[in-house]
Every structure is written in structure tokens, then in C-alpha cells.
Amino acid sequence: MRRLVPSAGALLLTGLSTVSAFAQVKAVPVLEGLDNPSGVAIHAKTGHLFVATHPAVLRVAPTTPAKSFVEVDAFKTDVYGKGPKYDIGPLGVALLGDEHLIVGDGSLADAAELVRVFKIGANPPAQPTAADNAAFKLGPIGPGEASAKGEGNFYAIAVGPKAFYITANGDDTKGWVLKADIVDGKPGKLVPFIATKPLVNVDAPVGITMSPDGKQLVVGQMGEVNMAGDSQLSFYDPETGKLIKNHATGLNDIAGLAYSPKTGKLYAVDYSWVDTKNGGLFRLDVTDSGVKAEKIVSLDKPTAMAFDKEGNLYITEFGTAAEGSKTAPGRLVKIAAGL
Amino acid sequence: MPQCSRVVPGLLPEAGVSSRPPGRHLKLAVPALLTLVLLPGQVPTQGADAQSGHPLGLPAVVAPKDNPQTPAKIALGKQLYFDRRLSADNTVSCADCHNPAKGFSNGEQFATGIKGQKGGRNSPTVLNAAYQTFQFWDGRAGTLEQQALGPIANPIEMGLPLPEMEKRLNAIAGYKTQFQQVFGVAEIRASEVAKAIASYERTVLSGNSPYDRFQQGEVEALSEQAREGMKLFFGKANCAACHAGPNFTDNAFHNIGIGMDKPEPDVGREAISQLEGDRGSFKTPTVRDVARSAPYMHDGSLKTLAEVVEHYDKGGHANPWLDEELFPLKLTAAEKAALVKFLDEGLTSPATQDHAPPKLP
């Protein structure tokens, strides 16, 4: 039975906004009432946004007001965290060309989770596609030499010309970035590619993106959620997986990374588990000697980010529920082009 | 939520006593297994990095800008560390609970403070505390300087109020002279006492182990069984999920189930963070020189490394806040033995420096 997302159809473009230290930068709500949104991707041709939430993947037409539709549903539910706890389902999303949507799963136990690739159209489907009806199912990666307990929590995805890469958080001794080659526009086998933990000594690759020239795979290493300031930024050769450079950032928990298509600058969202009031959007100025992180705007538990081709930035937030509220507090927000 | 009061840094009993630092314990029994950080002009210890002087396998120690390392300050801190006059009844020094001869812990489940008092946590080792981002098992102090005075003032540890400590030290001519020379102060203050002790502790390092030499290409440094154990440590046994990096710790907090079967478990980090998800979580200790620091865990409840391996093999004690990295490992008897071998043979440092008690003023 297909389930509708609580907020499917609920949308908004209100005047409410979060004002940063840079007064001109405002995060304006596009869609509210989302249930733990954790991924966002933008279709290059249509401009449609795909948003991963706990129960389903939504398609959002960025009109005013925005309109949302359920694209994929019928995911199972897993729970993340020990207090606070969050229901999670599909976690990461990315476009593979114009006709396929990659969805990383967090709805099952480690060693059982899949990366699914769905066929999509230019318009929302008449009926949501069930999670089980993916055009391609990659994985699972079970217990074995590469991963003691098997892989899971496939969080964020970066798509290159020859392969796509997805962060995983199953085996914390390895901290795998997984890879699937792309052949004739179709995904190949999902395989462990970069064991990040032995290289950078902290856990949890989460945010990931490709450099504008496609020559570097950029990974945000979240680190421990109960440790402040341990997030790192790593650059790898996407062909070989070799570590090019790694820097401390001083951020608490990098959850998403993206380059501005207009300025080439790199941005990160910091969830900041230890003190969510410090979460937000940061610009990362990277040099050979280190990273300077400058806060652009505060956000409430940001989880993922994506620029459209005009340079508008869309960010998902878990948000914080008001006392006694039964409405899901998650949001999709937009920062107008200019970053 | 449990009834936990917010803790004032440095004023909670750590292990039951203590001397120093919280978060560290050492235990062992060899007169010295540490190497000292070298200062300008000193000769590198055997096995140390030839350029920086710090032991093989470890990064350089970074001291706070307002408390740079100097030989005189380190020597002063060492005297204070070993001086029982820093306790209310002159019976307990930092070194009594964090004893160099016992791996900078004390070999007991809970150390004994003044008047025979005992706390509820095992004395954490001071070894490599220089690299930790949190001190004490629950991480309530962020630096060695912040941590240093806590056990001195703690009523069940050394029990000496800081004003009284200052008064005592100011009455000792030798200390007054040294503080004047090191810090340029006419009167000894607690803040400088903390800085001196912290400076000494930054010299208590464990590196240059067979594992480190193996990593440098000296294949014979590890026996075949230890090499098998090393492979398990970083693989099937999942140890490196938390015991990672040069100091074999992620500096984070985890619930591994220890003590969670008690009627009123120690909530650990939750008392500091106020996050339910931290309930029963404690700081990941280094496992360098771990063979010297029995008993193990924050409550000292496991007596041997074999018991530790058994605990992890069964996936810890089930509880609602158990870390997700705990799961049944299904290790064979041979694998368990190899893992213990690696922990013992592979991570034990040579005795390269003597941390014998100094002459006190």
C-alpha cells in the first residue's frame, strides 16, 4: 500500500526567513512539514527538486508556491540515534542523467540496505513508484573482509562522468565511500572504493561532491556526533581513490557539500549534533595549508544541499518540533543566487 | 531521564580517587614505559622521531599558547605530581592513583583517596593524555590544565581546598623560588599549579611500540600471532571503529554496555551533555600500553585483556543505548588469543624513561 507523505502537497513560500550575520543572505522556506528530509537533488532540465524524506522521495516543482508530489514511496523505516532518535528511510538522492534517480537507503539494517536507481519522467508519475520497483538495485554489501558487519546508511551521492560515488556508514573501521561505474548510462556493481577512516582517522564520510572540473572527489568526514569540531574535508582522485589532501575544518558535523556553479566556491552544511544552535551554512575557503570555514547563515539541523544551474541553493533541514506539535518540523529552504 | 545534576568541571569524583587526570589511567608495572617529549637541546630518545623527538607513531604534542613547555616547568610539574602534600592529610599524590610504576594507573578497580575513600570509576591512565580532547571518563574537562586541580580539591580524592593548597605551597620556600623562576609570580596560585602539572603530563607518552616499528617496515617487530591480531583489530573484531588514529582513540564517547546491568547505572557522559543518547557512554581510552593498565573499563570490572575481548565478542551488554558498533563478533578461540597477543605484544612500549619520584623541595 502506498503511503502519502504527511506534507505532500503542503508547500509554501512565505515571508519567513532566517537572517544570517550577512544580512543579505536569507534562507526562505520552500516546503515545510517534511519528515526528516535528508537529501536533495535538482533535475538539470526541468528544475524539479527531488527530496528524500523519511517515508518517501518527493518531487518538488519550485513554483510559487511550490508544489510537491510523491515520486517514490513504500520505504521501510529505521531509527537513527539513541536520544534524540529519528525515523529515517531513503537518505541520499542524485540524478543519473535526465532519466534516472539514484536513491541511497537508510531504511533497513546494515548489510541489507540497497542503493536503488529509479526511472523517472519529465513529470511526476500518476502513482508513486514503490521502493521495490527500482529499475536497478545495487548491493547489498554484506559482512565480509571489506566490512565486518556489512554496509548501510547510504547517505550522499556524487555523480561523475564515469561513476557515481556514495558515502556509507556501516563499518566504522573503514568508513567506506562506495562506487558504481556508469556504463552506457546505466549503473554497474556497487563496490567499496575508498576506506576513508584509515586515511583520515575520523569516522563517517557523509557529505560528498565532485569538484567543478571533475578531477577531485570531495568528502566531508562528519566525525563523531558527540565530538565538537572534528569534521574534516578530504579530496580524493576519483579514478584511483588516492587521498590528495585532508584538512580539519573546525566544523562539528559536515552533512552536505556543494560547489556554487556561478562562483566555484565550496559550501558545507553543518548539522552540529553537539549543539544544534551552531548549525548552518558555511563557505569553505580551501588552500594547500588548510580550510577556513565562514558561517553564512544559521540553519536548524541542515542535512543536505544542492545548487541549481542559476546558482540558487536548496537545503534540507530536519528542524525542531515546537513543544506539543505533531507536525513534522522538516523544511526545504532556498537561498537565492549570489553565493 | 535519570536524576543527574550538572557537573562542575573538576569537582566530580573520577575513579575513586585520584590524582590526576581523569580520563586516563594507566596501569602497569614496569618502572617506566614512557618517553619524554624532548625540548630544544635534548637528545632524542631511542625510538623517537629524530626531528621532533616525540615517540615513533605519535604526532607532536601541542601545548596551549599560554602554557608553553619548558624544562623548568616540566620539572616543577613533576614534583607537584608526586607530592602528597597536595592532599588534605598528606597521604595521596597524583602519582598514587596514576602511578608510573603501574602504567600511570594504580592496578586497582577503584583507587583509594584520603581517609580510605573510594569512588566508582577506575583511575584512567595519564599515558598520552596530552593528545586527548577530553579529560576524565565523562570528558568534563577539555584540557589538562582544566583537569589538573579537580582531583586535588575533590573531597574523596585528595580533599584539599585550593586556597589551602596555595597556602601550603607558599609556605615551602623551594616551591616559591621555582614558581618565581618559572612563572614570574611572587605568590603561588592554583592556576600556575595546574599549568605546571599539565606540562609534566604532556611528557608522559607511550609510542615506539612493536606495532609502530612494524608500520615503519620492521616486519620482525611483530610475531605472526600478533600480526594476525592486528589484522583482526582493524577488521573483523571492529576495535578500530573507536580505537583509531595514532593514539588509538576517537576521543569520543560510547556505550559498550559496561555497568548497564546494574540497578542504577553510571550515566557517564549524559551527566555532562544532558543528551539521552549519551547515557552510559564513556570516553574511548587509548589502548597503547593497555597490557600494563589492568583492570579495564570505566568501572575496572574486567580484570584481563582476555575478559575484555570476551566482552566485545559477545557484543557487549544489551541496553537501549548500546553503541551500534557493538555486535557479536563470532571470533574463534584462536582469533581471541591473537587479538590479546596484539594488544599485549604489539602495543606495549619499551621502558625508555624513568619517571621515578623526584626530590621534593
Image: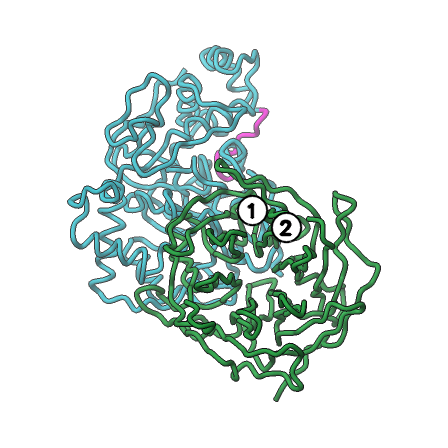
* Secondary structure category for the residue under label 2: loop
x and y, in percent, of residue A178 in the image: 42, 63
Q: Is residue B236 above or below residue B199?
A: below
Q: How is the image coloured?
A: by chain
- Picture quarter containing residue B174? top left
Chain painted in green in the figure: A
Q: Mark 2 points at which residue?
A: A275
Residue A7 visible in the current orientation: yes
Span shown in magenta = B155-163
How much space separates mark 1 and mark 2, taking CA atoms? 8 Å
- At a point 63% along the width and 86% down the height, the residue shown is A2
Q: Do the residues labelled 1 and 2 touch (CB within 8 Å)?
A: yes
Instruction: Name the residue type under label 2.
Output: Asp
Q: Which is nearer the eye, B31 or B198? A: B198
Magenta segment: does it hold B161? yes
A271 sits left or right of B17 in the view: right
Earlier residue among tags 1 and 2: 1
